[in-house]
Image (cartoon, grey):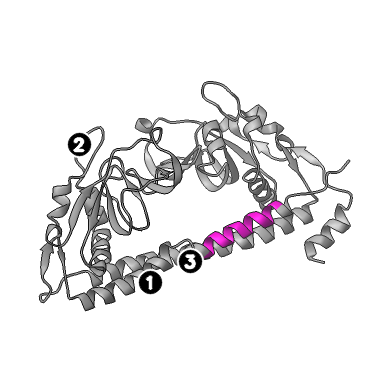
């Protein structure tokens, strides 16, 4: 029997009562104060909104340990950012986030974890701009075990969180290392010839298609973003290819594919030699920021195929290309592959955390 099981058996064997959130924490919403961006004076204190820090200002209105809860109904439903997040020290909060304070860190953290695990749609108003009002916030029922049980739950889940944070920090370090070596390996020396891309590759344009006019399937449609826009049942390219997004916010984004795909708003690059194709991909990823900066146009920015084909890259011998590709493939797998390496381990830890979180926060209800 674990320590938590013993505590539950001793302190709440018959179940746990639910208490409305308004009776657990102190609501400090009346002290919130929005300041338009033009009137803010830049400083060192975090200025919080519905999704976290949005600015830094020269003054503060709160000082301590707080739980901030988003008011934005659309955000709460979509869960694009955490529903509840902690903020400590001297801070400023506008009127798009509720501010709650608790007697102990453990209680604040417990409520934060619980709120981020449940569906709040029933507490969101259906007005023109959906929001989580203070009245509805205060009504949210929270299963509240004895403090010793609550503290042990927080300790267990915080250990999971700390491990994931360590893995994430390592991944960040590996990505920096990867970027450094990629730049080092792809920098031309005096003995390496540089040629324009149009000398070693051919470029094709994608085909027009609409989601409405296609049949759903498992083939990704590359429309211009960093991820497939949707999936259909036909392709316009098979095998290895470099795809460069042509227009939109991610115009110039470079991706590599080795499966059937349907490219629409993008360019397809092919070479006769497969090693040269992957090598060319890494050369283009190494100048990803510069490619984004070549965007032109007002409403819908775009990159031009002719500009891309005139870019010059160093082209060493095939043997050296193979060695470079082999090294960078291993770095790429370690830092981006969701089936192996650090991303896979972080995803596994996240799922493990969610499993134990849901298990630990499920109590028998006290009659």
- Residue sitting at the far top: 128
For the residue carrying disc 1, how many other residues have a C-alpha within 10 Å: few (<14), some (14-19), or many (20+)?
Answer: few
Q: Can you give x and y, in whole percent of width and height, for residue 7 in the image?
A: 83, 59
Which of labels 3 and 1 is toward the front? 1
Tell me: residue 127, above or below residue 327: above
Report the number of discs.
Answer: 3
> Left or right: where does residue 211 sit relative to residue 120?
left
Residue at the disc numbered 3: 342
Which of labels 2 and 1 is toward the front? 1
| Region in magenta | 345-358
Residue at horizontal 81 percent and vertical 61 percent from the top:
5
Q: Can you give x and y, in whole percent of width and height, for residue 182 in the image?
A: 28, 68
Residue at the disc numbered 2: 297
Identify the mark at residue 179; answer none if there is no mark.
none
Majority secondary structure in the magenta region? helix
Dividing the picture into quarters, in which one does residue 260 lie?
bottom left
Residue at horizontal 85 percent and vertical 48 percent from the top:
15
Mark-to-mark CA distance, 3 and 1: 12 Å
> Of marks 3 and 1, which one's residue comes earlier in the chain?
1
Residue at horizontal 78 percent and vertical 61 percent from the top:
4
> Of marks 2 and 1, which one's residue comes earlier in the chain?
2
Q: Can you give x and y, in whole percent of width and height, for residue 113 in the image?
A: 64, 49
Q: Can you give x and y, in whole percent of width and height, for residue 119 in the image?
A: 64, 39
Residue at the disc numbered 1: 330
Mark-to-mark CA distance, 2 and 3: 38 Å
> Left or right: where does residue 300 sit relative to residue 40?
left
Tell me: residue 85, above or below residue 197: above
Front residue of 75/142: it is 75
Mark-to-mark CA distance, 2 and 1: 37 Å
Q: Are marks 3 and 1 in contact (CB under 8 Å)?
A: no
Q: Are marks 2 and 1 in contact (CB under 8 Å)?
A: no
Dividing the picture into quarters, in which one does residue 179 lie?
bottom left
């Amino acid at each position: 029997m674990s320590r938590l099981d013993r505590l539950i058996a001793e302190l709440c064997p018959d179940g746990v009562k639910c208490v409305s959130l308004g009776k657990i924490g102190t609501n400090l919403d009346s002290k919130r104060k929005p300041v338009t961006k033009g009137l803010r004076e830049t400083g060192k204190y975090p200025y919080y909104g519905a999704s976290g820090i949005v600015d830094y200002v020269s003054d503060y209105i709160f000082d301590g340990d707080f739980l901030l809860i988003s008011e934005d109904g659309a955000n709460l439903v979509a869960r694009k950012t955490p529903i509840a997040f902690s903020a400590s020290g001297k801070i400023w909060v506008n009127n798009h986030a509720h501010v709650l304070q608790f007697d102990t860190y453990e209680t604040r953290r417990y409520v934060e974890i619980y709120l981020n695990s449940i569906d709040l749609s029933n507490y969101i108003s259906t007005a023109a701009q959906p929001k989580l009002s203070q009245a509805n916030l205060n009504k949210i029922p929270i299963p509240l075990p004895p403090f010793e049980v609550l503290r042990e739950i927080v300790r267990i889940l915080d250990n999971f969180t700390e491990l994931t944070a360590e893995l994430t920090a390592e991944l960040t370090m590996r990505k920096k290392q990867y970027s450094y070596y990629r730049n080092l390996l792809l920098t031309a020396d005096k003995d390496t010839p540089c040629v324009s891309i149009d000398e070693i590759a051919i470029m094709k344009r994608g085909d027009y298609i609409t989601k409405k006019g296609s049949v759903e399937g498992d083939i990704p449609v590359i429309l211009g973003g960093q991820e497939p826009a949707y999936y259909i049942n036909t392709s316009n390219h098979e095998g290895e290819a470099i795809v460069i997004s042509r227009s939109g916010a991610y115009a110039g984004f470079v991706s590599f594919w080795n499966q059937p795909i349907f490219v629409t708003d993008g360019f397809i690059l092919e070479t006769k030699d497969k090693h040269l194709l992957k090598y060319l991909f890494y050369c283009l990823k190494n100048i990803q920021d510069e490619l984004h900066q070549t965007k032109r146009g007002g409403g819908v920015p775009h990159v031009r195929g002719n500009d891309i084909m005139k870019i010059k890259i160093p082209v060493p011998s095939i043997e050296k290309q193979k060695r470079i590709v082999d090294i960078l493939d291993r770095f790429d797998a370690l830092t981006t592959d969701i089936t192996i390496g650090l991303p896979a381990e972080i995803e596994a830890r996240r799922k493990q955390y969610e499993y134990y979180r849901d298990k630990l926060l499920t109590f028998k209800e006290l009659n």
